[in-house]
Amino acid sequence: MIKECTLRVLPEVAANAEELTSVTAKKLGLGRNEITNVEILRRSVDARQKQAYINLKVRVWAGEPFREEAITLPDYKYVENQEEVLIVGMGPAGLFAALRLIELGMKPVILERGKDVKRRIKDLKGINVNHIVNEDSNYCFGEGGAGTYSDGKLYTRSKKRGDTDRILKLLVGFGAVRDILVDAHPHIGTNKLPPIIAAMRQCILDHGGAIHFDTRVTDILLEGDKIKGVRTQKGELFSSDHLILATGHSARDIFELLHRKEIEIECKPLAIGVRVEHTQALIDSIQYKCETRGEYLPPSPYSISKQVNGRGVYSFCMCPGGVIAPCATSPGEIVTNGWSSSRRARSTANSGIVVELRMEDFAPYADQGPLAAIAFQKSIEKRAWEFGGRTQTAPAQRLMDFVSDTLSTDLPDTSYAPGIRPVRLSEVLPAFINEALVHGFKKFDQSMRGYLTNEAVVHAPESRTSSPVRIPRDPKTFQHVRIRGLYPCGEGAGYAGGIVSAAMDGEKCAEAVVGGMVRSK
């Protein structure tokens, strides 16, 4: 007999297989010895009351042996001699598009401006330690994209866009822990992602796909309104009638190229703000309503959103037990982001706190046309670099000092490796963003008592929350509205927001390419 049921148990019970089995047997009216296994299907923390509980959905095996579902990879074909599809970018959208093309019998040819996961590490050290930004290899660019070295969060609200379980199971097939199939907010961790990405790369190569690292696309070749290929910075030509453009939200040179080529793109609002760091112990005490987090509870995240003068002010990419990272993609700018390892074991917690922007906010840059939001981003990032001393040292302020617009006389320790410098952030941020954040933090403290403390430190800016452009495409064919054979894809094209949604979009674009070829024959 196999049954499913839901349970609400203490954290120590959820962590102990024997106790969990006993509780399950009692709920189902079974003898303890009748149960051969309790398989956890879903797990989440309920910390709304003073006592935290774990909510579980379980599958119970009674009177028969447990058979764990095997997670296997698809039957990938060998495609070396099949028709080629160009993919620009090797983040989640590009990777999953490539794998889906192979599954469907097409050959992906990936062009990635950055380096493989192993060689990227040297360039990350360069920006963290030496303040040197490599424009092609950094936290945003390189094999696996931004997610590889900035956390690997897999939670998505985009479940209507595709099969999220399929994406998670593929990741497990390539080496991720099965817990990502169970947890309400699945997370792999920056320390665990590189070998998974490398395994995906090897699968693509083993099945006849091609990957070109250190290959920056500088031109898109057209014949009338049809894609014919691309040209690279080295002068190489790659020909194909099919191009999946999956460059991520920071590939400004690609957006500029599209605009020059008169390939339609649209300005898109995003959110911009700061990254705030507290001690993890404080966040735990607020969220779990206790002095010290129990050993069976994970480091607590938080998610909070308020309205200030009609604008949303909200947490973004919150990293429990995490680190703030320098994520600039060009010299002369500062960008902050955050990541956590798989255990989330650091003593600090950080989150982007950002303000919703509107199209009218970009009016001072209207002469930039569809690139106006990029110009707005750049202006803040360059100002932060100036106030940071023209290095990757980030302008910063204690949280209560930020709210009172007082220059901090000193700053607490930070996880941000390049270091921080006391600055009145009202001189860095546009006035309306600064004002919204000030009021937002006051409202946050009403919901999370203790959040507004001068032991927390504000780093500026958090400016790469999503793409500043959308590349319009036909919702049925996934092709650009005017250019045949061009498939704008993933977060950079404005159709995803995170690893899972980008991966799903990559698969859909791959399916659209193959479907379009079948229809044209």
Image: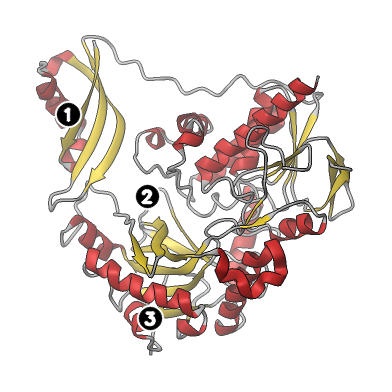
Relative side of 150 to 351, left or right: right
- The kind of residue tagged 1 is Glu
Q: Quadrant of residue 509?
A: top right
CA separation in Å, label 1 and label 3 = 50 Å
Q: Which mark is residue 402?
A: 3
Decide which of 485, 370 is in the foreground and name it.
Answer: 370
In the image, is 257 to the left or to the right of 490?
A: right
Nearer the viewer's eye, disc 3 or disc 2?
A: 3
At a point 72% along the width and 48% down the height, the residue shown is 112
Residue 202 visible: no
Q: Earlier in the sequence, mark 3 or mark 2?
A: 2
Q: Which mark is residue 18?
A: 1
- Residue 16 in which image quadrant: top left
Of mark 1 and mark 2, the one earlier in the sequence is 1
Position of 194 with respect to 314 (left or right) is: right
Q: Is residue 17 visible?
A: yes
Crowd tier of the residue under label 3, counting other residues whose Cα lies within 10 Å: few below 14, some 14–19, many 20 or above: many
Please say if 445 is above or below 100.
below
Instruction: Estimate how packed mark 1 is, as few (under 14), some (14 to 19) or many (20 or more) residues with alpha carbons within 10 Å.
Output: few
Report x, y in % for residue 339.
46, 57
The image position of residue 498, as x and y in percent, is 51, 47
Residue in the image at 27% along x and 62% along y:
283
Check disc 3 and give the amino acid type. Answer: Phe
Between marks 1 and 3 in the image, the one whose residue lies nearer the viewer: 3
| Residue 206 figure quarter | top right
- Residue ID at (37%, 88%): 406
Q: CA distance from mark 1 to mark 2?
A: 24 Å
> Callout 3: helix, strand or loop?
helix
For label 2, the residue is 343
Inspect the image, locate mark 2, and give the three-letter code of the amino acid beneath it: Arg
Helix or strand or loop: what does disc 2 sit on?
loop
